[in-house]
Amino acid sequence: MTIAIWLTLGMRPVGAFLFGLMADRFGRRPTLMLDILCYSALGFASGFAPSLTVLFVLRALFGIAMGGEWGVGSSLTMETIPPSTRGVISGLLQAGYPCGYLLASITYALLFNHIGWRGMFMVGAIPALLVIFVRMGVEESPSWKERPPKPEQMWKTVFRRFPLFVFVILLMLIGLFYAGRYGWRRFAAHRAAKQSAVSSSPAQASEAISSPDAAAPSVSPLDLSVSTSAATRVRITADDKLLLDAELPAGETRHFSAKQQFEVTAGDSSAVLLELNGQAMPPLGAPGSSGTMVLSQKDLRQASGGTTRP
């Protein structure tokens, strides 16, 4: 998830640049409407991501759309309102961030146990309704209608304030660097744990061949982390021994150990997140359906999944 957040934030400057050019070319109002539709649709689509890779791609695209909203929306607002009220209105615009966090927290507290993490992404489609308000109740920027900006004007502004432009770019790059370094360290730690588990078996097998009297090589144990985003029934067996068969509440995280393999079954596949030796595993099955997966030292295979519950 660290990588997904990093991609979202890292692509925001790209979106600010692209949608800013569109706003200068086609107008603030239609660009803002397109931008709202884009990030609402991408947020909704994130709830259907079938794998972690697809989720990363969707969150990166979401970051592009998210980056365009602030610049285009603030430009339309500041160019439309009277100059005497710009101080108050700019404060209200800045208050949008904490208000959004507050609404997200309330939504999480009330709905997360019922709709899970996929449903939380789908709630992000609600801002698309703002397009109706913008279409019916917001006028185009008077400044843009009087004199639509030309591309060369942007570059003149950049060169006129070049030191400030470089400072802002460096500030964003520093933030992205430290966020990316943190995410890479997490990823490297997971990859190292996986490679250690895989490489230990061949090394121990070669020692057993060279020394016939040696005891059988010990197998690196498996560590399974099971987290639930919504209440669901989970059954776990380790080396054919039943470890768990119970209803787990939302937000629960449990760890299990095995020598050879796990078999995990869940009533709601989308409500269970699995990590094997620190490595994220694919979903057990389709959202809203039961699924079973066998996790072993050699491979990961989905024994059955997507079977709709009766």
Image: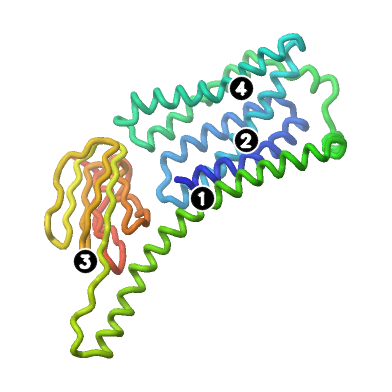
Q: Work out whether mark 2 precedes mark 3 in sequence or the reverse, and give the earlier one.
A: 2
Image coordinates for residue 146, horizontal then vertical, percent: 84, 19
The residue most toward the left is 241
Query: In the image, which disc is placed on residue 260?
Result: 3
Sequence-first tag of 1 and 2: 2
Q: Are marks 4 and 2 in contact (CB under 8 Å)?
A: no
Earlier along the polypeptide chain: callout 4 or callout 2? 2
Is 121 left or right of 255, judged from the image as shown?
right
Cβ–Cβ under 8 Å for marks 1 and 4:
no
- Residue 128 image point, x, y percent: 53, 26
Q: Is residue 69 left or right of residue 243?
A: right
User: Measuring 46% from the left and 35% from the top, which residue is drawn there?
Assistant: 44
Where on the picture, by quarter, is residue 204? bottom left
Amino acid type, residue under disc 2 in the picture: Gly
Query: Where is mark 2, residue-wise?
Result: 67
Mark 1 highlights which residue? 182
Left or right of 170: which side holds 229?
left
Q: In the picture shown, does residue 105 fall above or below 270?
A: above
Residue drawn at the location 33% of the way across and 73% of the way down: 200
Q: Secondary structure at mark 3?
A: loop
Question: Which amino acid type corresponds to the residue marked 3 in the rendered image?
Answer: Gln
Tell me the distance, in whole angstroms, between the alpha carbons under discs 4 and 3.
Answer: 54 Å
Circle 4 sits on which residue? 94
The CA span between labels 1 and 2 is 22 Å
The numbered disc on residue 272 is: none
From the viewer's perspective, is the residue at label 1 or at label 2 nearer? 1
